[in-house]
Amino acid sequence: MKSMTLMFLELIRILVMLPLIGGLLWYTVFGPLYEVFQVPEGYRIIGAAGIWVFLFILYRNFLQFTGWYKGKENRKLPRLAVISLTVVSLFMTVGPLFARFL
């Protein structure tokens, strides 16, 4: 029963923390940056998806080990996956800045 409660608390933590971090990144960094560079609305969605990829990496490699639930299957992403997803996230967040030149 205790494990189920901790898992539920961890789920609530994820549902609160990740949108909060993603929203802060969007409204303080990428939203204003996309406004300055006049990025079209359709391309901004790609940037938002890039933020979610970054948050996935952040959670899997750091945040899951600082929470309440300590499962046996908790492990970091492989190094190649981290590098690949980081490159994808960078292209997705920085790429829309160059969309108007296409």
Image (cartoon, helix red, strand yellow):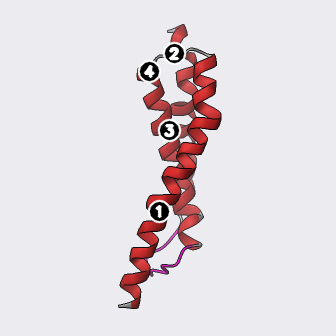
Q: Residue under label 4, please give it.
A: 41
Q: Which residue sits furthest bottom?
A: 1
CB under 8 Å between callouts 4 and 3?
A: no
Q: Is residue 43 left or right of residue 97?
A: left
Q: Is residue 24 above or below residue 58?
A: above
The magenta stretch spans which residues? 67-75
Distance from the alpha carbon under mark 2 to that under mark 3: 15 Å
Q: Is residue 52 visible?
A: yes
Mark 4 or mark 3: whose residue is earlier in sequence: 4
- Identified at 57% across, 56% down, the residue is 58
Q: Residues within 10 Å of mark 4 (few under 14, many from 20)?
A: few
Element at label 1: helix
Residue 99 — which label?
2
Distance from the alpha carbon under mark 4 to that under mark 1: 27 Å
- Identified at 54% across, 66% down, the residue is 76
x, y percentage for residue 39? Answer: 53, 17
Mark 4 or mark 2: whose residue is earlier in sequence: 4
Residue 73 colored magenta?
Answer: yes
Q: Residues within 10 Å of mark 1 (few under 14, many from 20)?
A: some
Distance from the alpha carbon under mark 4 to that under mark 3: 15 Å
Q: Amino acid at mark 2?
A: Ala
Mark 4 or mark 1: whose residue is earlier in sequence: 1
Residue 50 — which label?
3
Q: Nearer the viewer, mark 3 or mark 1?
A: 1
Residue 95 colored magenta?
Answer: no
x, y percentage for residue 51? Answer: 52, 41
Residue closest to the eye, 2 or 92: 2
Q: Nearer the viewer, mark 1 or mark 2?
A: 1
Task: Say which quarter of the image contains residue 95.
Answer: top right
Residue closest to the eye, 88 or 68: 68
Q: Residues within 10 Å of mark 3 (few under 14, many from 20)?
A: many
